[in-house]
Amino acid sequence: QVELVESGGGLVQAGGSLRLSCAASGLTFSRYTMGWFRQAPGKEREFVAGISWSTGRTYYADSVKGRFTISRDNARNTLYLQMNSLKPADTAVYYCAASTGDTDIWVERRYNYWGQGTQVTVSS
């Protein structure tokens, strides 16, 4: 049974930092492309960042480029999202997701498994 468990969310002031983690089990983590998505109140879920299993290449939404960094530790079966210079607009529930594919990494429907999400709230 595949399980993705996010942690590290919380309340932070604008300009601050948080690091999200996603612990994966029940799958061969190193063979999955991993992504972070977020959903703000009243909005659709959107792509934040992704990392290819085969090349290690990273992808970012324009809104977070230069502020967020996605990384993975295959030995620990863990995905990370380092978030710096946070803004109130970054407030959302953040989800990690796993995909057996390695293309269209920013497309939600490419992902096979999802975590339950962790809340990030950025105060102004």
Image (spheres, rainbow, N blue to C red):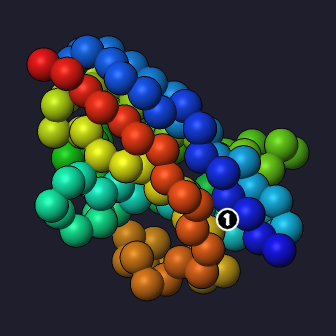
Residue 47 found in image quarter: bottom left
103 and 114: which is toward the camera: 114
Q: Could you say where residue 32 lies in the image, as x and y percent from the top left?
A: 69, 69
| Relative to 3, 62 lies left or right | left
Amino acid on which disc 1 is placed:
Trp
- Callout 1: helix, strand or loop? loop
Question: At x 17% / y 31%, what residue is drawn?
Answer: 88
Reply above or below: 112 against 55.
below
Q: Could you say where residue 102 lies in the image, as x and y percent from the top left?
A: 57, 77
| Relative to 42, 39 lies left or right | right
Question: At x 24% / y 39%, what residue is drawn?
Answer: 90
Figure quadrant of the N terminus: bottom right
Q: Could you say where residue 124 lies in the image, as x and y percent from the top left?
A: 13, 19
| Relative to 117, 2 lies left or right | right
Residue 30 found in image quarter: bottom right
| Relative to 40, 50 lies left or right | right
Q: Could you say where residue 4 lies in the image, as x and y percent from the top left?
A: 67, 58
Query: Do we see residue 58 in this rendering?
Result: no
What residue did someone put label 1 on? 53
